[in-house]
Image (cartoon, coloured by chain):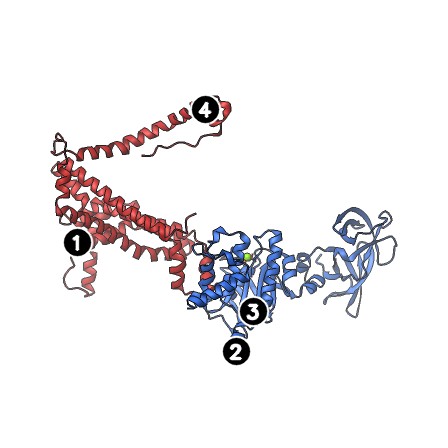
Chain colours: A blue, B red
Amino acid sequence: MQEAVKANAARALDVEDLSVRYGTSTAVDGVTLAIEPGEVVALLGPSGCGKTTLLRVIAGFVRQAAGRVRVDGATIDHLPPNQRNIGIVFQNYALFPHMTVAENVAYGLRARGLKGPEVEARVSRFLETVQLGGFRERLPRQLSGGQQQRVALARALAIEPSILLLDEPFAALDRNLRLDMQIEIKRLQRTLGLTTILVTHDQDEAMSVADRIAVMHKGKVEQFDTPVAIYDRPQTLFVNGFIGTTNLMNGRVASLQNGRATVALDAGATIELAAPAGLGIGAPVLMSVRPEQLALSAIPGPDAWKVEPGLALPIGAQLVHEARTTDGTFLKIIEPRRAVSNDAVRVYCTLAADARPTLFPRST
Amino acid sequence: MRTMTPPSPDGATSPADGGGKRSVLAEWQLALPLALAFASIFLAPLLMLVGVSFFNDDKITQPGFGQWAKFLGDPFSYKVIADTMLLGLKTVCATIVIGYPLALIYLDASPRLQKVLIFIIVMPLLLSVVVRTFAWIVVLGREGVVNTLLMQFGIISEPLRLLQTELGLVISLTQIEMPLMLLPLISVMSRLDPNLRDASSALGASRWRTLFKVIVPLSMPGLVAGCLLVFASSTTAFISQTVIGGVRLIYLPLLIWQQSLVVFNWPFAAVVSLTLLVSVLTVVSALSYLGRRSGGYVHG
Ligand SMILES: Nc1ncnc2c1ncn2[C@@H]1O[C@H](COP(=O)(O)OP(=O)(O)O)[C@@H](O)[C@H]1O
Ligand SMILES: [Mg+2]
């Protein structure tokens, strides 16, 4: 009993100041992540930002130039990949093409010296878990993409790893299947209590599956936070632009008081909002605000600016407006679709009641 | 004998053509020169060889089974056949033992080193047979490189007899035939997904387990192709066999040469030639059958 608890206990994973260099280029640059036991963390970033490389260091395939990786506080940097007990699902699944589904899943168990009936029992259990019980004797090439991926998952889970790494596991699947698999992975991860890192360049996927998201850019982690915090309070302009859709408006700091700034927008309104550190009066700034946090109104005011409404596209239950400000910026505004609205007179734009705009310094 | 039919262009079989028969005939005519060339170059000599083997006298005047009876009735013939096939198998084994690790080293090398290695690998193919055979005489001779080195380091006191022994012959054939093993091996192995090794290792497998459970099975098609080429080439390597092996080691090609160009008994030479052809084809088919069975999953 004690053993079983230990084998299934979730592990903490710490990545400390990790750097990887290929020749002269730096693929991972001083990354630090403290991942809680049982947490799902998404590594999110554009292609080439070092996500796979970071994963390969954790798995032990690539040696870092600097930094440490710890599991439950103990460094694993000296261990070869076959002693790390980390499950990994590759972007292309990397199933052994000459082995059947059952043999693929049994591979890690046999490598651990398990024999006949025990291997058999575990293979059956994990194939049932991923709902592929009837496919034991198929070869990988006789399976669809989604089935192959589930075999890869079963193969990684069968060794009861302490940590699960998934490299863009859903990239090759079509939309519906992707959603199914995301739910599936989330469910499995919950039941098994596995600490999981999911690499993706798809923000919706990161938002829906992860407890926390590490947004990467050029080898660095720009922000490591919950999906909501990343969406609502992006720390850098890159994160702001990469996550969701946003409007950027030019302005200058008019006054500063108690960590709040009054910003005079070039579009012709004054807005008060939280100021980042290091801004002076008169500093050029960018205000970022999400489309659904803007509203059109018929009433002028000091915090409303004049716009010239453009196209309005109904998308589901929402209406997406395009509008042009007096300084020539195009804004995207999303409102719930109402039965009656007189768009002709709504020529002012304001922040919606619950708006959380963010201020970034602007280099001129 | 296969005749080649060129792929039919869409227009040739379209109903608008009117006479479907005529277009088929036209295709035949296109393939005809090639078919004739094949027939005259390969089929005719082979048929002549078969024909000549059924004459009793070396003037080729009396038809009969006399030469076949003479060859197949002589125990010495079977020894030569066995020696020839064994020479091929030993060379195949040696090229595998040395070539497989070399292919693994090549795969792990940096792209720049790979360029150098591939040049060294194909080098034997670029030299004339005579040149590389005489080079081996220099290396293996009584006062050759091998003996001089071994004596200087005091490993042996008497020079080893390497020339005109089967060992020396296998050593030199191994070097000469190595590209035929390495090229198919490397071409198959470098197409393997590198993630497979990592996957194996992440699942807890040692390097050896990864090698024998993943890399070897998946490189089987290359290994089989290499074995076939090396076997067919080393059993028929007349120049190396006679120059390095000498006249006391008798293999089928030497027998053919003696019968046809020394004693001018062409019917007997034809019998030996056909025996060589059939023996090599038998072993080659057996090898490729075994290869298909063990590497069956890989194809397709
Ligand atoms: N084996 C390698 N050799 C040299 N450069 C590499 C290698 N692997 C990755 N890189 C480089 O490191 C950077 C990060 O790559 P990667 O981690 O694969 O990015 P991602 O997975 O985020 O798309 C890229 O610029 C890539 O070109
Ligand atoms: Mg990647």
Image quadrant where one finds the C terminus of chain A: bottom right
Q: Label 3, on which residue?
A: A15
The circle on residue A2 is: 2
Placement of B3 over or under A270, stated as above or below:
above
Q: Residue furthest bottom?
A: A2
Q: Position of residue A306 (x, y in %)?
A: 84, 52
Placement of B98 over or under A112, stated as above or below:
above
Q: Amino acid at mark 4?
A: Gly
Taking the image as shown, residue A307 lies to the left or right of residue B116, namely right
Q: CA distance from mark 3 to mark 1?
A: 63 Å
Q: Position of residue B74 (x, y in %)?
A: 12, 45
Taking the image as shown, residue A85 lies to the left or right of residue A270, namely left
Mark before the other along the chain sequence, 4 or 1? 4
Q: CA distance from mark 4 to mark 2?
A: 81 Å
Q: Amino acid at mark 3?
A: Val
**Which quarter of the figure has residue A13?**
bottom right
Mark 3 or mark 4, whichever is nearer to me: 4
Q: Label 4, on which residue?
A: B20
Front residue of this view, candidates A355 and A2? A2
**Which quarter of the figure has residue A49?**
bottom right
Q: Residue at x 18, y 44 (%)?
A: B252
